[in-house]
């Protein structure tokens, strides 16, 4: 098991509102093997609906992020607009990026491993 710091970006794009939880569970599995890994989960498509504060998915995401401080979750602003979700209504630990596709490309350009969910 390596302790060398590494980075991974998870692409969680789809229609399931609980897709972020699937990504988080896989992130936890990765952290078990490589605990020093920095992980960012980029959520797009209809899956962003599960990130709104008070949604059962977002509440579970909040708890899991408290336990896994090296993991962050960001929503695609394009998807938020498409599903008429105000960024201000996202759960507190959830950030936003202008475009998921651009964020994922940028992370890969910076040598982050890509994990597609």
Image: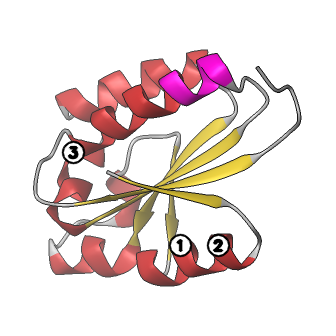
Q: Quadrant of residue 21?
A: top left
Query: Could you give the CA–CA distance between mark 3 and mark 1, rounded to whole angstroms?
Result: 20 Å
**Residue on which disc 3 sits:** 50
Viewer-nearest residue: 44 or 110: 110
Q: Are marks 2 and 1 in contact (CB under 8 Å)?
A: yes
**Residue on which disc 2 sits:** 108
Judging from the image, what secondary structure is the residue with disc 2 in?
helix
Q: Earlier in the sequence, mark 3 or mark 1?
A: 3
Q: Earlier in the sequence, mark 2 or mark 3?
A: 3
**Above or below, 93 relative to 1:** below
Q: Nearer the viewer, mark 2 or mark 1?
A: 2
Crowd band around label 3 with a 10 angstrom C-alpha radius: few (<14), some (14–19), many (20+): many
Query: Could you give the CA–CA distance between mark 2 and mark 3, rounded to whole angstroms?
Result: 26 Å
Query: Could you give the CA–CA distance between mark 2 and mark 1, rounded to whole angstroms?
Result: 6 Å
Asked whether, in this view, residue 98 is left or right of residue 17, the answer is right
Judging from the image, what secondary structure is the residue with disc 1 in?
helix
Give the main secondary structure, helix, strand or loop, of the magenta stretch. Answer: helix
The answer to whether residue 113 is magenta is: no
Q: Position of residue 38 (x, y in %)?
A: 72, 42
Q: Nearer the viewer, mark 3 or mark 1?
A: 1
> Can you see residue 54?
no
User: Which residues are drawn in magenta?
Assistant: 29-33
Q: Which numbered disc covers residue 104? A: 1
The mark total stands at 3
Asked whether, in this view, residue 16 is left or right of residue 30, the answer is left
């Amino acid at each position: 098991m390596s302790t060398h710091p590494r980075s991974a970006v998870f692409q969680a794009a789809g229609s399931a509102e609980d897709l972020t939880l699937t990504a988080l569970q896989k992130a936890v599995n990765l952290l078990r093997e490589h605990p020093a890994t920095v992980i960012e989960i980029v959520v797009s498509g209809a899956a962003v609906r599960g990130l709104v504060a008070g949604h059962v998915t977002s509440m579970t995401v909040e708890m899991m992020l408290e336990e896994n401080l090296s993991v962050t979750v960001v929503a695609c602003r394009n998807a938020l607009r498409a599903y008429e979700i105000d960024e201000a209504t996202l759960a507190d630990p959830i950030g936003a990026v202008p475009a998921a596709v651009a964020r994922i490309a940028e992370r890969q350009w910076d040598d982050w491993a890509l994990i597609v969910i």
